[in-house]
Amino acid sequence: MWVKTSDQFHKHPKARAAGKEARALWRGALEEVNASNDGKGSGGVVTEVILRDAAYFEEIDNVDETAKRLVKVGLWHTAAGIKKCTSEYCQQFLAGGGKIGPGEYYFHDYYEWQLTTDQSKIPIARMRANRAKALTRWRERCQEILERDGTLCRYCGRRVNFLDKRGALGGTYDHVDPDKFAPDGGNALADVVVACRECNGRKGDRTPEEAGMALLPPGTTALSLVSDPYGSDPDLTPAKNGPSPGLTGTEPDLASRARHARDSGHRSGRAKSGPGSGQVGDGSGAGLSGPGGAGDGAVAGSGAGSGPGPVSAETEFDDREVS
């Protein structure tokens, strides 16, 4: 039986507060609990036998006091304490009929990280594939994800297109932690986000932290990540002595903006005749936004944008990519 623990566990505030001896008991008991887990939701309970065995192997004399320290810092629960815990994983244990007897303890958030016996017998790649398949069939959950994220990649803020099956901006679903399989089989709303194909591939089977990426708040656009989209170029800053004819005081001079785009490819790439890219923006239909309708695209272009329009309730989910 494999035991999953973080290599940063000793730095966690709870682990630090518990002390070295309590951390050793926690690890020893976790190994014993996993070895005795029957895969039916009863795993995570530290019985008296498990407690004594772990204390023996870890050479801990005052086991009762050490266990109380783990309860005090919140790494273990008593029967009374778990009823007050608001963690979804601890409440899931109680909802499934889990019980903690006298002199027993329960690992806080046990099923957030540990696999059941049945799960541990399945290769991790197959578990991920089964999880992805289950998500594509769960239309309500997919709709909830889209209602929260829209069609914006949660890693780069660019707008994705779920109809694009090959391009870098094709829409996919990504599991933030690829090795998380509970609750909801790993498809909990908080654990799945919209991602462009490029970011999904770059992240791979890693967490955002492991991949050196940041998970952006829902609704964050790529343009909003730029603190000063016009930089220090005087041609792109709003006029200080009043607006140009027909423009507001906060709007940049369009002729200067077009000239800058032609010369240096600023923001929208080098200007060129023909259709604009229409892939950067907020889908409003103006300027550089490039929605499904007509947009400016690149500054010197005037073709139709390629970004997607609003998500319809009739959108199909079955063939969307999930990682």
Image (tube, rainbow, N blue to C red):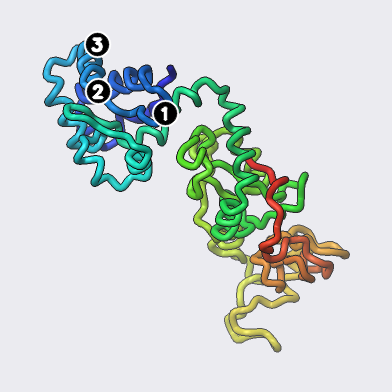
Q: CA separation, marks 2 and 3?
A: 16 Å
Say which mark, if any, is on residue 47: 2
* Residue nearest the observer in this picture, 294 or 235: 294
Give how far across and how far down residue 66 sits, in percent.
16, 25
Residue 199 versus residue 65: which sits nearer the camera? 65
Q: Quadrant of residue 292?
A: bottom right
User: Residue 278 is drawn in which quadrant?
Assistant: bottom right
Dot in front, 2 or 3: 2
Viewer-proximal residue among 60 and 284: 60
As measured in the structure, the alpha-carbon distance from the residue carrying label 2 to the one carrying label 1 is 16 Å
Residue 323 appears in view: no
Q: Secondary structure at mark 3?
A: helix
The one of 126 and 15 positioned closer to us in this rendering: 126
**Residue at 51% across / 32% down in the picture?**
179
**In the image, residue 12 lies at what x, y percent?**
30, 35
Residue depicted at 65% across the width and 38% down the height: 201
Report the residue at 24% width, 11% height from top: 57
Percent coordinates x, y for residue 261 in the rendering: 75, 64
Q: Earlier in the sequence, mark 2 or mark 1?
A: 1
Reply above or below: 9 against 58: below
Are the two marked residues, 1 and 3, in contact with CB atoms closer than 8 angstroms? Answer: no
Rendering quarter of residue 259: bottom right
Secondary element under disc 1, as helix, strand or loop, is loop
Q: State the residue lying farthest toward the bottom.
A: 245
